[in-house]
Amino acid sequence: MSRAVSGLFGRIAVALALAATAYGVTSPVLAADAELIARGEYIATASDCIACHTAPGGAAMAGGLALSTPIGAIMATNITPSKQNGIGNYTLKQFDAAVRKGVRADGKLLYPAMPYTAYALLSDDDVAALYAYFMNGVAPVETRPPETKLPFPFDIRLSMAGWNLLFLDKRPFDPDPAHDTDWNRGAYLVRGPAHCGTCHTPRNLFMGEQASSQMAGGDVGPWYAPNITSDPNSGIGGWSVEELVAYMRDGHVAKSQAAGPMAEAIDNSLRFMTEPDLKAMAVYLKTVPPVRDPADTQPVFAWGRPSDDLASIRGAAWPQDRDQMNGPQLYDAYCASCHQVQGQGSFEGGLPSLVHNTALGRQNTNNLVMVILNGLHRQPDVLMPGFARELSDTQVATLGSYLIQNFGNPAAKVTAAQVATLRAGGSTSTWPVWAARVGLAVAVLVLIGLIALLLRWRGNRRLATQH
């Protein structure tokens, strides 16, 4: 529904232009505006703006979604053209500064939960198209989300000046003449609008992306965004371009099925992109410098074999204490009816095989646990139910360990403590350490920001004295 609302006015503009053409009163300006709005809607879709700026059950682009970060919740803002509560008073220049430089119209700096470091690569033409779409193709919503309120010292927005000096490259995308058109289009989309690195690149002490580990995998709350470098073992080097396109478009191939934030990205963004653009992204991703986890001794999708332990429990009494159930019993009760006795899945492939599946081949088992707890949901369908209400932490750990040992990478582990942490929304045990580290980082960034402002002031003063 929110996708339809967000594109309503863009389609109306296009329809008006077509109607004008049919009656012989075509206006070049109207036609150009309709094309610009439609292009802006496509870029906004590729950028997945709706995912962060739309609260569950809320109006499209009206904000209000609390984005969880290690330093606290950052509230998504209203980016509809409301003049009172949104961005309706923004000029193109101010819109550009917010999107590509992280600077609001009032001069305050945005937190990098808004991926402006990726959007900095957008072309001038695409920014202008985005502006046309948001001002003319999005319905204004007269609600104001709560302000972001982070604890001290994280509420010091000046620190972002120092952060930007370290991590913001303001240069738009520059095509690489050593590569063809497809590769350059893919590089632009992956690194710019689609901002894949925001989730798939690990973060450093300052929460900036680690330049040496681009696309090597990162944590997204309780979920794990896997390695998508070209490495054949840890990454997607063993995937074909066709498989990558199908995965981005449909959310599933034999090797893997999308869940969590990736499923949302597909449902809100990637499935609406053109086939040539998805292919270009796949072509580029296949060339991202490989990064390998030494523990991955073979491709993560190559682990496992068909296995059948269910005969061992036939006729055996089940324990009264359900936490004493063993792996075969839990598998028989909750998994076998869909994934079959040997984990082979359904014959037509609708229900995936657990053998040679990335969900069971990774050392990081967070996604496996999260799927058992929450299920696998794709708009508008539930492809797998979640068992968070039915299974205890011990049962999930037992079942997860059984799945890994029988169908996946036996070196991986699932523990009851891990399940409890993920069930609660992610790790909090390291919060004091993170708070100390990030607090120090903020202090350093504030100092860098002050030095930058001082140097800028001195430079302006020197120019003034020269004139």
Image: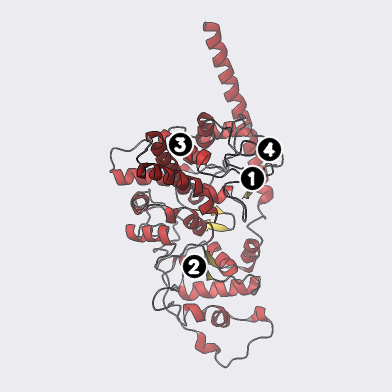
CA gap between label 3 and label 1 equals 24 Å
Q: Is residue 239 left or right of residue 83?
A: left
Of 216 and 294, nearer the camera is: 216
| Circle 2: residue type | Ala
- Within 10 Å of disc 1 (Cα), the crowding (few <14, some 14-19, many 20+) is many
- In the picture, the disc for residue 411 is 2
Q: Residue at x 38, y 35 (%)?
A: 27
Residue 155 makes an appearance in the image: yes
Determine which residue is flagged by label 4: 155
x, y percent for residue 423: 64, 63
x, y percent for residue 425: 64, 58
- Give the quarter of the figure containing the N terminus: bottom right
Is there CB contact under 8 Å for labels 4 and 3?
A: no
Q: Please identify the quarter of the rendering in which residue 212 is found.
A: top left
Q: Is residue 339 left or right of residue 416?
A: left
Determine which residue is flagged by label 1: 74
CA gap between label 1 and label 2 equals 37 Å
- Within 10 Å of disc 3 (Cα), the crowding (few <14, some 14-19, many 20+) is many
For marks 1 and 4, give the one nearer the viewer.
1
Circle 4: element type? loop
For marks 1 and 2, give the one nearer the viewer.
1
For marks 2 and 3, give the one nearer the viewer.
3
CA gap between label 4 and label 3 equals 29 Å
| Circle 4: residue type | Asp
